[in-house]
Amino acid sequence: MIDFQGVSKVYEHNGNDLRAVDQVDLTIQKGEIFGVIGFSGAGKSTLVRLVNLLEVPSEGRVLVNGEDLTRLPKPELRKVRKRIGMIFQHFNLLESKTVRHNVAFPLSIAGTPKKEINKRVEEILDFVGLTDKADQYPDELSGGQKQRVGIARALATSPDILLCDEATSALDPETTKSILKLLRRVRDEYGITILMITHEMNVVREVCDRIAVMESGRVIEQGSIFDLFSNPQHPTTKNFVRTVMENEIPASILEGIEKRGASRHIYRVTFVDESAGQPVLSQIAKKFAVEVNVLFGQITELQGIPFGHLVVELQGEDKEVLKAIDYIQRTVTVQEVKAHAG
Amino acid sequence: MQVDLMEFWPRILQATNETLLMVGISLLAATIIGLPLGISLVVTRSGGLLENKAFFRILNSVVNFFRSIPFIILLVAILPLTRLIVGTSIGTAAAVVPLVIFSAPYIARLVESSLLEVKSGVIEAAEAMGATPWQIIFRVYIPEALSSMVLNLTIATIGLVGASAMAGFVGGGGLGDLAIAYGYQRFETDIMIATVLLLVLIVQITQTIGNILSKRIRRQ
């Protein structure tokens, strides 16, 4: 659907080349919600603008539906842009127009007949749940409502692709959730491919199927949301994962472990999918002569799959503990925790 | 020789008419010229919708050039041009030409600053929707900036009222001329006060109308 092939965007800045986007290869499949996450300045805003050619690539190609938009003459490009909706962090609504007219605007500039516009506007306002706000002005709306208008406006021309530029970054957590839910409905009910960029890990966790992590213009890691969360490779990715999932053992617990001495058996048990539903810890407590003491842990859900880990201390004879570990390793991942290693 | 204010009243009314006429016509003409200039200044600047650095640089300098000439000097400096355009270099019509040349670049700057208030993100959103540059100018820039433009045009109008007072220099008439000719040169304090009060009234009314209009546009 969207294909980045060796794409770079270079700006000249005081005689120096600034590579905002650097040799990016990405493929976004039809109907998926793809997230690009990165800290500010990572180049993700530029990346998303390369899709609808608000930014023109310096190197490489961006194919949208197999078509290289840079080859299109301006009028053709404008036609294609109507098939690519876009929403923004600060909504970018027309302040002088009512909600209804904001949503009608892309249709109106496309020369759609009045009757058709009215019908479509009603339909789409109903979809985003703003029918009762149709005649209000943007400055009378809350942030979440404004973004709903933004989404309605982006969907008015029935696009195949929706680009989201930090669409929830200006919203509070509750509103963010409701907007993400709406975006998921956009994909599920209209089959629209969504490319979103964000710096919020909880956003991608909530809705994305796959994500790419960007740093200094490069994609440093990409994969399914589950892979990246359960097994992040790059330090930046690990940092992002840490923002929503505490992976490190808290200092107070570490201290406690150190005090008790290195002879203790401390393990990190990672649960994935079905294993999260199995009572492995109580099983080993029954089967072997060990006591299980849970020190710390977190279980969450990624893409509907339970995922989490527990840090446990196994008390008992060395032999028994090893046997117990051997036993549960069949269903879960176990790592020994050294007091110093954390 | 004292003048009876009551008897002099028709003369004041006539001068008021002249002022309103000069200001009205100049405002209209200067806006017709200044609006497209202001729009051009915004869209041709670097990063603008129709970026054209050479055009912008020239236009920018020309506007600055005219903005830097004091009105009283402009008034006499362009007498030949005035004669060419309106056929005479004296009278109310003759005052309109320098007033237009004086305020058109000013209005261009005011329009420019109003348009620059429109958030670049809104323009970007329109571009992303596939709007043409013309659609963006007429359906985004202007409606979004209209309320602010009306306020700015109010400022320009009041500036014109002030400048029109100097029109007496070319026999343009108007309240300012009257104040100088009678109030100042002939020590008719009554007339001076009456004309100044009238000017104050005109400015007050203009500003009030501007404020109301601007507010109404914001909330159509």
Image: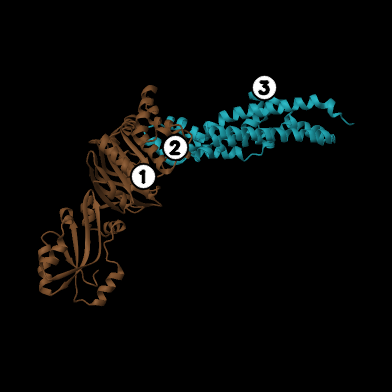
The reply to whether discs 3 and 1 touch (Cβ–Cβ < 8 Å) is: no
User: Could you confirm whether marks 3 and 1 are on the same chain?
Assistant: no
Label 1: which residue?
A167
Residue farthest along the right direction in this orientation: B1
Compare residues A190 and A12 and report the one nearer the observer: A190
Give the amino acid at mark 3: Gly
Give the amino acid at mark 2: Asn
Mark 3 or 2, nearer chain start: 2
Percent across and percent down for residue A137 are: 47, 35
Compare residues A224 and B53 and report the one nearer the observer: A224
Label 3: which residue?
B87
**Rendered view: A152 above or below A42:** above
- Shown in brown, the chain is A
Disc 3 element: loop
Q: Is residue B46 visible?
A: no
Q: What number is the disc on residue B52?
A: 2
Q: How far apart are marks 2 and 1 (CA)?
A: 32 Å
Chain ID for label 3?
A: B
Foreground mark, 3 or 2? Answer: 2
The reply to whether discs 3 and 2 touch (Cβ–Cβ < 8 Å) is: no
**Residue sitting at 81 percent across and 36 percent down?**
B184
- Shown in cyan, the chain is B
Say which quarter of the image contains residue A245.
bottom left
Q: In this view, does A173 lie to the left or right of B27?
A: left
